[in-house]
Amino acid sequence: MRTFSIFTLPAGLTDRDRLNRKHMLARMGLAWLAMMQVMMFAFPGYLRSQEMSADNLQLLDQAIFIMNWISLVLTVPVVLYCAWPVWGGALLRVAQGRVSMDVPVALGIVAAFIPSAYATWGGTGEVYFDSVTMFVAFLLTARYLELCARQAVGTGAAHALIEQFRVSVSRRADQLAFWFVVIQLALAFLVGAVWYVYAPQHAIAVMVALLVMSCPCAMAMAVPTAVAAAHATLSARPASTDLDVVRLTQATGKVSRQNLYASVIWHLLMTPLAAMGLIAPWLAAISMLLSSLAVAANSWRLFRRQTRVAPTAWRGAPAQG
């Protein structure tokens, strides 16, 4: 059996695609590095308590002030360089009069970064630099997995059939993701406005958490990762009949639906908690990453299950006709 991985560079990849992949990896690596440092510098803020003595509280506030400025410096390249594809995608879709997942992502970054920078400059207020860097790092991780999955496409009639399936299913998935983003955006601003009226000190955190939750990263990965698993199966077992390919396609469709519906259910469960202020922005970012990793793991399970047996015994719904 030939070893296959979505992280292996395909032989027919163009120079432009290779460069795009390298840039994505560089952005992801920088975002993760900055995230780990910013989270470390944010730790003193979680220790602050009014029950501390005046001297200790003053010393801690001075440390927090310095740490916030360092976090700001580390977050700027994450926002400007690492998140550059987000800004480009959001501006392009807005110019076209459309809404994509880049729009809520961009709004979430702005809603968290601008107040944090203002609070750092003034020396008072809450900062969310850890949430910003974590959100961007996790988002780029999910998108890198999606990019590798989309590029892991083999050649031949069987692979072409899988790609035809991907195109047809992706249309429905994209339509679902579109309406999901629109509803989540409206909900984020509505809930944020309500919190601003009754508890303005928590309004930004709640709205940022909802904007983070509105990013359908797992939905975007639902079909590409399942299709990548199908391509991996065909590459691992090139000697397959038409019946095998049909069964594999049907099994891929089943996993795609599992990924898509499970990600929707996950968002529906987490969104009310975020609206009630029970989920911090950084926790919403972790939730987004976990849902994306769950989708990738379920698709990988398809590949492992299909390659454990002989091609003629591939699991899936019986062929029709």
Image: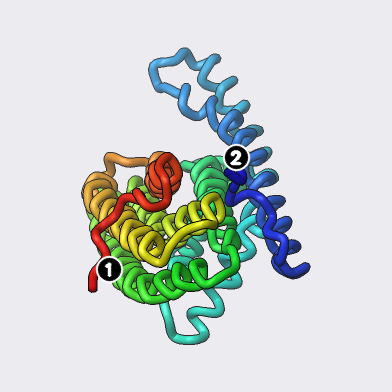
Question: For residue 256, which quarter of the picture?
Answer: bottom left
Foreground: 265 or 209? 265
Foreground: 132 or 229? 229
Q: Is residue 302 left or right of residue 158?
A: left
Label drawn at residue 35? 2
Q: Which residue is mark 1?
A: 183
Q: How far apart are the two marked residues, 1 and 2, measured between alpha carbons?
A: 29 Å
- Look at the picture and state if 94 lies above or below 197: below
- Look at the picture and state if 242 lies above or below 272: below
| Element at label 1 | helix
Measuring from the top left, give residue 207's x and y in whole percent: 35, 55
Please name the residue shown 57% across and 63% down the image.
153
Q: Amino acid at mark 2?
A: Met
Label drawn at residue 67? none
Foreground: 59 or 142? 142
Furthest residue in direction right, as rendered: 15
> Could you tell me which quadrant the N terminus lies in?
top right
- Look at the picture and state if 94 lies above or below 155: below
- Look at the picture and state if 171 lies above or below 56: below
